[in-house]
Amino acid sequence: MGTGLPPKSHLTVPMLEGIIKQVGGDVDAETSFLYITLRDLGRRIAALADEWLAEYGITERMLGILFKLYVHRARGPISFDQLAAREKMPPATLTVTLDVLEGNGYIRRKPHATDGRRKVVSISVRGRRFLHALFEHHGRRLEEVFTFVDKSDRAQLAALLTRVSQAFDAWEDRAEASRRTGAKGA
């Protein structure tokens, strides 16, 4: 049974305006279009990335953790708790994920310098080499996917998506602060 929506990326703002009018909605069609399109593209790109990453024996989530550890490396190891919070992962799930990454030699875990009960995590030399090789290969594949968008449009899109991402981060921070304040006042 069809949804009434066109396949893949063929949805347009005017089409969405018509659908919203038919169902009696009072929402901004452009905002809805952005949500639907970004969600759809995110899912499709994630599925493609999962397929590619499976060739390397890792998942998108593992890649995200390795990348965060790589970026964080200049500041030293990151605590397990900080990583769990940044990844929005339950501790048990993060432990299993780190077990796989550590088993492959991509990360190191060791006791915290001042609190032996806590653990810190860092990317290993092997993990950095793995990321470099993966990004080179993965990057070429992504360039193939985006060949239909010229370089200046990609730069413009990247700038816009950066602003959207930053705005969403700020919104999430405000929402979290509001939840904490509301929870304290209860």
Image (tube, rainbow, N blue to C red):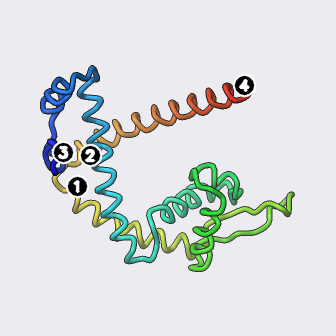
- Which one is closest to the eye, mark 2 or mark 3? 3
Alpha carbon of mark 2 to alpha carbon of mark 3: how far?
31 Å
Label disc, if present, on residue 3 of the rendered structure: 3
Type of amino acid under label 2: Arg
Residues at marks 2 and 3 touching, judged by CB atoms closer than 8 Å: no
Q: Which residue is mark 4?
A: 186
SS at badge 4? loop
- Which one is closest to the eye, mark 4 or mark 2? 4
SS at badge 3? loop
Q: Earlier in the sequence, mark 4 or mark 1?
A: 1
The outermost residue toward the front is 1
Q: Quadrant of residue 157?
A: top left
Residue 168 position (above or below residue 62): above
Residues at marks 1 and 2 touching, judged by CB atoms closer than 8 Å: yes
Alpha carbon of mark 1 to alpha carbon of mark 2: how far?
8 Å
**Residue 64 % position (x, y):** 50, 59
SS at badge 2? helix
Q: Earlier in the sequence, mark 2 or mark 3?
A: 3
- The answer to whether residue 125 of the structure is visible from this angle is no
Q: Earlier in the sequence, mark 1 or mark 2?
A: 1
Label disc, if present, on residue 146 of the rendered structure: 1
Q: Quadrant of residue 136?
A: bottom left
Q: Which residue is mark 2?
A: 154
Residues at marks 3 and 4 touching, judged by CB atoms closer than 8 Å: no
